[in-house]
Each structure stands twice: as structure tokens, then as C-alpha cells.
Image (cartoon, rainbow, N blue to C red):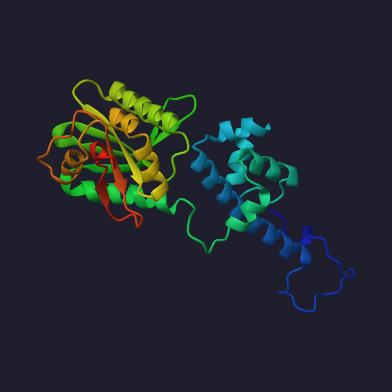
Amino acid sequence: MSTAADTPSHHPAGAPRADPAEKTPLEIAAERAAFLAQQLGTALRVRRAELRLTQTELGARVGISQRQVSVLEGGRASSASLEIWVRAAVGSGVRLAAFMEGASGASEPRDTHHLAGQNVCIATSRPGGWEGTPEYLLPGDPFPRSIDVLLTRITRKEIAVIEVWDLITDGGAAMRSLERKVATVRDRHGDEWRVQGVFIIRATRRNRDLVAKFREVFAGRFPASAMAWLEALRNPDAPMPDAPGLLWVDLDGTRLLPSRLRQGR
């Protein structure tokens, strides 16, 4: 760590500052750079999470290492070159200016709606005897994946793999991802546990229209009754359905609603 003696001074040798507590322009600049790096790092981390990329995958897009991405996201890159920050932004599919505009510490997290979906899932299922673990990491994978919420009901040897979606950009990929995560959890817990998956989608008009347009696809992939899933989450005596299900979370993020796929919505 540098000391006052290590810091360059523009004062003549031996001449004291007018105010010993006054910061030099270099000190002010360093503080501002550290603050900006912290904000940009948070914005980068949130954007990467939205894209569901690992640090390694993001870095590979633009030729920077996983360690560099980690340093950027950790807010420890106040001295990083402008080119590195631009590369990170390009890898995230946005301009650097968008990071700067969206990095205000006074605004809510960009994943507020996602957090709300996780929160209402855990709160709704608690009376049903479920223990909820958000962002459950699946260890041992070359590219670590996480489950949005892993619900475990020990009394019935049941596990629900929950994926929360605010915006579906690739429905097929999302369904395959859930299926792979369910299969991984089944393999690791053995035959004595029952494991199923659930999609929880934010009930925006766009998402509702998308599901309605491809109703047969979603109904085929999530054939279980949404009402049965809600009952299983809320009631400790209600068994978990034997098939995947789809639920809505309302726009306020306070309630889970049945999807009613067989009725078009």
C-alpha cells in the first residue's frame, strides 16, 4: 500500500499543503475511478447473468481470460484499459455507454423481477414443507451451472428444479437446459428421490402471447396440471406431480398463478 511519502506532490519541496486534509487531484481521480469500476463491474455481472453465461464463456467471446472477467466484475479493475472494458461490453452485446448509464447505485438491480420470482417461489412453497435454495450451483461441471431455485421436501423425498424466466429469448434452449438440470439432480440423488422441473414465467403480455402461440409445444413439454403443482407447493400432504409444470408469476412478483395451458393460457 502506498503511503503519503509515495504519492507525487505538486507542491515545492518542504512546502506544506494549505489544508492537510485536502485531497490532491490524483487522489480524487483514483477514488472516482475505483467507484466507477465498482459500478461497471456490477453492471457487467448482472448482464452476464441475464445472458446465462459463465465468466469463461463471456471472456472467450472477445479474447479475455476468465480471471480478467472476474476482476472486472469484482470492481477491482479501476486501472483496466478502455479496450478491456469495451471488449467486455461487446461480449455482453451492449455498448460501454449502456453499462455506464445503467450502473447507477441508486437504481434497483437489473434482475429485480428475477429475484421477485425466486422470492415468491420460496415463500409460496414454505407452507408446503419445502426448503428453497436460490441459485443452487451444480458442482463438477466444466462450466458450472446454477438452478434458479432448488426446492427440497425431505419428508416426501421430493425435489423440484425451478427455473424462473423474465424474458424467453430461446424457448427450445430453455427447455433443454431445464431437462439437463433435472437429469443431473436425479443422477446425484438416486432412485429414492423423485425429481421434476417447473418453469415459472413472468406474466407479461409478450410472454403470455408467446406461450399461447406455441401452446401445443409448451403443453407437450409441461403436461402436469398447474393447479396440482400449486397445491403441492402449498400443501405438505399434496404429492408432487409426476411431470413437469408451468406456472406464471404476476407482474408484481407477489403471486404464482396457474398456466392453464389446456385452455390456451
| Relative horizontal placement of residue 21, taking residue 161 as reference (left or right) | right
> Is residue 80 or residue 253 the one in the foreground?
253
x 20%, y 32%: residue: 158
Establish if 129 lies above or below 218: below
> Is residue 6 or residue 119 the one in the foreground?
119
| Relative horizontal placement of residue 12, taking residue 46 as reference (left or right) | right
Q: Position of residue 208 (x, y in %)?
A: 36, 45
> Is residue 94 or residue 132 the one in the foreground?
94
> Is residue 90 or residue 189 the one in the foreground?
90
Figure label count: 0
Residue 171 visible, this angle = yes
x 52%, y 34%: residue: 54
x 18%, y 23%: residue: 192
| The C terminus, quarter of image | top left
| Relative horizontal placement of residue 24, taking residue 252 as reference (left or right) | right
Q: Position of residue 146 (x, y in %)?
A: 41, 35
Q: Residue furthest left?
A: 237
Residue 65 visible, this angle = no
Q: Position of residue 179 (x, y in %)?
A: 35, 26
Q: Residue furthest bottom?
A: 18
Establish if 160 lies above or below 207: above
Q: Position of residue 142 (x, y in %)?
A: 49, 24
x 28%, y 32%: residue: 219
> Which picture quadrant has residue 70?
top right
